[in-house]
Image (spheres, rainbow, N blue to C red):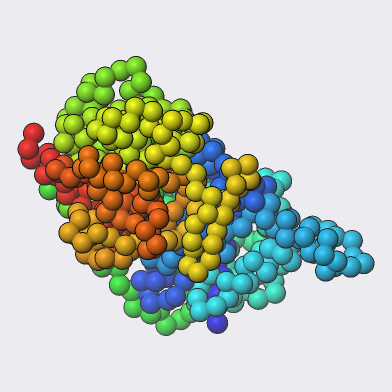
């Protein structure tokens, strides 16, 4: 029997509902349950694939090639359950589906309305998760009170009614702001938010109260009284220094016990939190520190590189070091010497990116890393920029560039119009839609024996997730390899370069895929483990 937990948010956005859902998922797993997490997003985009990272943070890509909300990354990092495209939907997708059905005549004769047609479509999305999971955790994006959220709230209200209270639970995440003049945490916004939720017909079973300091018993009792909720079900969620502490602190505050109690589960299965204890122990007692420079474009919004930041931290956990990140806006290297900014760092990482702005700066960062023998990790765009750098400065191909920035003399990076996925041919045209037309999702790559990457992975065949339109042009392989840039990973048909690495360099690797998406704190990604290990060695040398 599947039970459903709905997580809504109130008072303000960015409360960490995704993290809260992921941590609760991890706690339920620690009690031996099978879980599945999903997210309903109220915005109108069909998926976040076309949104700027400045607007919405990172786009998380699943194995099956869906461009999804970054919260799915939290879910996968905390539970290890690979996210699927069907774990995320948006108002845009729901309406698209309903309108397609209407055109096809599926509702012939009916007037199409928000209730029941849109709400039914939302309920179908939730119900489709009903498979092997014992708990489905469903997060509702946005904040209660937003116009866009209303159909979602109505749908989960109906859903709760249909499956019955024994199988549906509502958790509301709110904020208790601290007001310095009063010297106390305020409960009024939470009271109002619960009232708003009640006006949508949903009575929260559990309140998860975010605060930047301890919530005292009086405040808890006050919230319980005004919101008509058992005091034990008003759970403090106070800020912690590492997100991986969250499952432990939630457990200490009684979240999983209260969830069990609300569902009427009397015999609590035993709990094993040892993986989280170990992770937190390694984070809190590092034996050293390395500094990694991230040279990118979206450096002033940390959420743009969410999975990347986490994967680097996981590499640190594996090497028992703290990884301190230095974000550098790449454009700066177009007018300033990289030396001033990069001197002393133990590793340089150029992450994924789009468009010409800042590209030359990234090329200079790759050159600096290559010449100074500092570990370099180029991810997707960062690989492409490193290839351009080597082509220009070691192969003497002065006009080497990417066709992403316009026509050029030597397209070492070019648009692939046709490629193979499994047994199928995929294709795109230069003038086609931008949404959903990239090489997306999991693709295999064959690794060259004896290469640094095959050593790091400990295997000859890997599968990694992609999200890009352009590829390294295989026709330049001989020239680049003569200059020392080895093509150490290729698509199985040998047409698409997936990994390059520099000979005679401590660690210079570019990958066309996004390894950060699959890294977990309890299973750090081999390339991040190896990169941080190289950074530790580099640190010992200086
Ligand atoms: N803009 C590049 C491309 O489309 C790289 C994309 C990325 O880094 N994810 O190929």
Task: Depth check: give the residue in front, 351 or 200.
Answer: 351
Residue 58 shows up from this direction: no
Quadrant assignment for the N terminus = bottom right
Task: Depth check: give the residue in front, 190 or 397.
Answer: 397
Task: Depth check: give the residue in front, 61 or 471.
Answer: 471
Q: Position of residue 147 (x, y in %)?
A: 71, 46
Q: Position of residue 178 (x, y in %)?
A: 46, 37
**Residue found farthest to the top:** 335
Residue 385 shows up from this direction: yes
At a point 16% along the width and 42% down the height, the residue shown is 505
At a point 12% along the width and 40% down the height, the residue shown is 538
At a point 8% along the width and 34% down the height, the residue shown is 542
**Residue found farthest to the left:** 541
Q: Is residue 266 left or right of residue 452?
A: right
Which quarter of the frame holds ligand 1? top left
Q: Position of residue 317 (x, y in %)?
A: 22, 53
Q: Is residue 214 left or right of residue 175?
A: left
């Amino acid at each position: 029997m599947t039970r459903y937990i709905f997580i809504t948010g109130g008072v303000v956005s960015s409360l960490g509902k995704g993290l809260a859902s992921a941590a609760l998922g991890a706690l339920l797993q620690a009690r031996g349950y099978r879980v599945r997490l999903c997210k309903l997003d109220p915005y109108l985009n069909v998926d976040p694939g076309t949104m700027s990272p400045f607007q919405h943070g990172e786009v998380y890509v699943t194995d099956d090639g869906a461009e999804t909300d970054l919260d799915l990354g939290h879910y996968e990092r905390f539970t290890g359950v690979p996210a699927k495209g069907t774990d995320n939907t948006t108002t845009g997708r729901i309406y698209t589906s309903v309108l397609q059905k209407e055109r096809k005549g599926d509702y012939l004769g009916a007037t199409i309305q928000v209730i029941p047609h849109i709400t039914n479509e939302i309920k179908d999305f939730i119900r489709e998760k009903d498979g092997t999971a014992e708990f489905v955790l469903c997060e509702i994006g946005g904040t209660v009170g937003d116009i866009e959220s209303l159909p979602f709230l109505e749908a989960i209200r109906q859903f709760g009614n249909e499956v019955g209270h024994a199988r549906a639970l509502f958790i509301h995440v709110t904020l208790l702001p601290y007001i310095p003049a009063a010297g106390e945490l305020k409960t009024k916004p939470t009271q109002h938010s619960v009232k708003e939720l009640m006006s949508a017909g949903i009575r929260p079973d559990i309140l998860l109260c975010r605060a930047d300091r301890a919530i005292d018993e009086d405040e808890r009792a006050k919230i319980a009284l005004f919101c008509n909720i058992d005091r034990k079900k008003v759970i403090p969620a106070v800020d912690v220094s590492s997100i991986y502490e969250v499952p432990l602190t939630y457990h200490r505050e009684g979240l999983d016990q209260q969830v069990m109690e609300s569902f009427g589960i009397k015999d609590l299965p035993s709990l094993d939190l040892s993986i989280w204890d170990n992770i937190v122990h390694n984070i809190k007692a590092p034996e050293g520190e390395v500094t990694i420079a991230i040279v990118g474009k979206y450096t002033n919004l940390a959420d743009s590189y969410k999975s990347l930041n986490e994967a680097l931290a996981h590499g640190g956990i594996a090497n028992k070091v703290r990884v301190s990140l230095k974000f550098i806006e790449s454009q700066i290297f177009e007018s300033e010497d990289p030396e001033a900014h990069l001197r002393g760092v133990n590793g340089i990482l150029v992450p994924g990116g789009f468009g010409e702005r800042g590209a030359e700066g990234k090329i200079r960062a790759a050159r600096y890393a290559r010449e100074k023998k500092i570990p370099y990790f180029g991810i997707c765009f960062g690989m492409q920029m490193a290839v351009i750098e080597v082509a220009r400065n070691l192969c003497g191909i002065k006009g080497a560039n990417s066709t992403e920035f316009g026509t050029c003399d030597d397209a070492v990076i070019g648009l692939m119009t046709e490629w193979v996925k499994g047994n199928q041919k995929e294709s795109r045209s230069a003038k086609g839609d931008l949404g959903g037309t990239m090489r997306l999702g999991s693709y295999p790559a064959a690794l060259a024996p004896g290469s640094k990457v095959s050593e790091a992975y400990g295997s000859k065949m890997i599968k990694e997730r992609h999200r890009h339109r352009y590829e390294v042009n295989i026709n330049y392989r001989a020239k680049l390899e003569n200059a020392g840039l080895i093509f150490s990973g290729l698509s199985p048909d040998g047409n698409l370069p997936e990994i390059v690495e520099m000979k005679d360099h401590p660690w210079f690797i570019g990958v066309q895929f996004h390894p950060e998406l699959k890294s977990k704190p309890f299973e750090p990604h081999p390339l991040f483990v190896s990169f941080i290990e190289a950074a530790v060695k580099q640190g010992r040398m200086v």
